[in-house]
């Protein structure tokens, strides 16, 4: 018989999952199947937030074009996911390290060692926001799987006072006061975890998917890709130089020798080399054209996308 009692904790991420109640007696294969069955629901939960995620991409693009920065702020697993997404932007899209940043309760030690009490100190959150110089040009996204983390709530409140654009990513509905605070709320409700309260599982997976979409979407809008090729990279080592040459060979239809010449003339910047080749101009003219076109190569070269 199903119990009609109210859950002891209203946060969905803290409730027990009836489908995994006997997982402690399961075989290894049964454990895999139980976890996999729950994980299948994650993408659907994220899909329900498509419009909110698109709005966050738009806000991030506007922030970057206005000279602002994107900050992720979280504690524990949520904070680590924010720091991870921020750290992956420079090598993926050739961005400055300041452009996307992650703040985590407890600071750098919390990246590799649990600092669980750090999430309960709102004063530390306000100090971290102040130390980062967050202001009206910036976009601050709080990440709180449970929707209630004191560190995140305090950080968002402080950022709002400083005029920043505010967002939240949570996998359990936040308090109304938090929702009234933010410009965008992304709430993929993934349900109770396989292991109760272990938000590094479904909630963590959903959060990773959302953050990937926000930064990837914003970078695409800024012109960091040509089609689905990463072109805003600099050939700073042998692997990247080889990749850069191959991209130029494919996009421009040239042999490797010519690709190397273009890359050298463009100062190692693939995006500039493509514009130089397609427009038949020098580096300075290509840079100017890209700036006028908002950084998007196709707007400058008028290339039509290939048929699907």
Image (cartoon, rainbow, N blue to C red):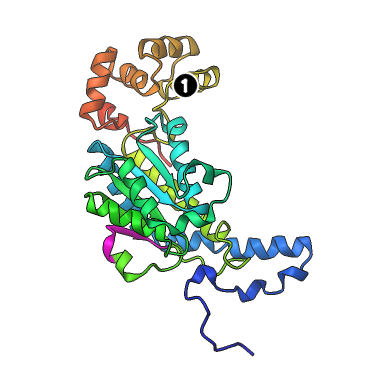
Magenta residue check for 217: no
Quarter of the figure that contains the C terminus? top left
Residue in front for this viewpoint, 151 or 24: 151
Q: Secondary structure at mark 1?
A: helix
Going 27% across and 62% down the picture, which residue do you hit? 181
Quarter of the figure that contains the N terminus? bottom right
For disc 1, the marked residue is 244
Going 28% across and 12% down the picture, which residue do you hit? 282
Going 39% across and 43% down the picture, which residue do you hit? 215
Image height of 14 relative to 111, above or below = below
Quarter holding residue 180: bottom left
Image height of 283 relative to 48, above or below = above
Residue 259 location (% of width, % of height): 44, 14
Residue in front for this viewpoint, 277 or 27: 27
Residue 30 location (% of width, % of height): 74, 65
Magenta residue check for 181: yes
What residue range appears in magenta?
180-187
116 lies left or right of 181 = right
Residue in front for this viewpoint, 167 or 163: 163
Residue 128 location (% of width, % of height): 36, 46
134 lies left or right of 239 = left
Going 30% across and 44% down the picture, which residue do you hit? 130
Camera sees residue 19: yes
Residue 67 location (% of width, % of height): 24, 36
Residue in front for this viewpoint, 37 or 255: 37
């Amino acid at each position: 018989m199903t119990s009609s009692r109210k859950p002891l904790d209203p946060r969905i991420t803290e409730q027990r999952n009836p489908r995994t109640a006997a997982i402690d007696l399961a075989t290894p294969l049964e454990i895999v199947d139980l976890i996999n069955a729950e994980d299948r629901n994650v993408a659907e939960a994220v899909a329900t937030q498509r419009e909110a995620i698109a709005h966050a991409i738009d806000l991030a693009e506007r922030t970057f074009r206005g000279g602002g920065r994107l900050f992720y702020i979280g504690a524990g697993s949520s904070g680590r996911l924010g720091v991870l997404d921020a750290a992956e932007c420079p090598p993926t899209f050739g961005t400055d390290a300041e452009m996307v940043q992650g703040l985590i309760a407890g600071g750098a030690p919390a990246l590799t060692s649990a600092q669980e009490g750090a999430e309960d100190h709102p004063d530390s959150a306000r100090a971290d926001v102040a130390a980062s110089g967050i202001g009206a040009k910036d976009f601050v996204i709080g990440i709180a799987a449970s929707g209630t983390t004191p560190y995140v709530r305090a950080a968002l409140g402080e950022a709002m006072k400083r005029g920043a654009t505010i967002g939240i990513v949570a996998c359990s509905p936040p308090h109304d006061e938090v929702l009234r605070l933010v410009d965008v709320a992304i709430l993929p409700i993934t349900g109770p975890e396989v292991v109760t309260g272990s938000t590094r599982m479904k909630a963590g997976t959903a959060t990773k998917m959302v953050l990937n979409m926000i930064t990837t979407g914003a970078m695409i809008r800024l012109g960091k890709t040509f089609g689905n090729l990463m072109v805003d990279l600099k050939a700073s080592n042998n692997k990247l130089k080889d990749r850069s040459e191959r991209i130029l060979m494919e996009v421009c239809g040239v042999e490797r020798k010519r690709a190397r010449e273009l890359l050298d003339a463009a100062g190692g910047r693939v995006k500039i080399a493509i514009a130089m080749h397609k427009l038949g101009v020098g580096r300075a003219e290509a840079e100017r054209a890209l700036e006028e076109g908002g950084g998007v190569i196709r707007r400058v070269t008028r290339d039509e996308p290939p048929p699907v």
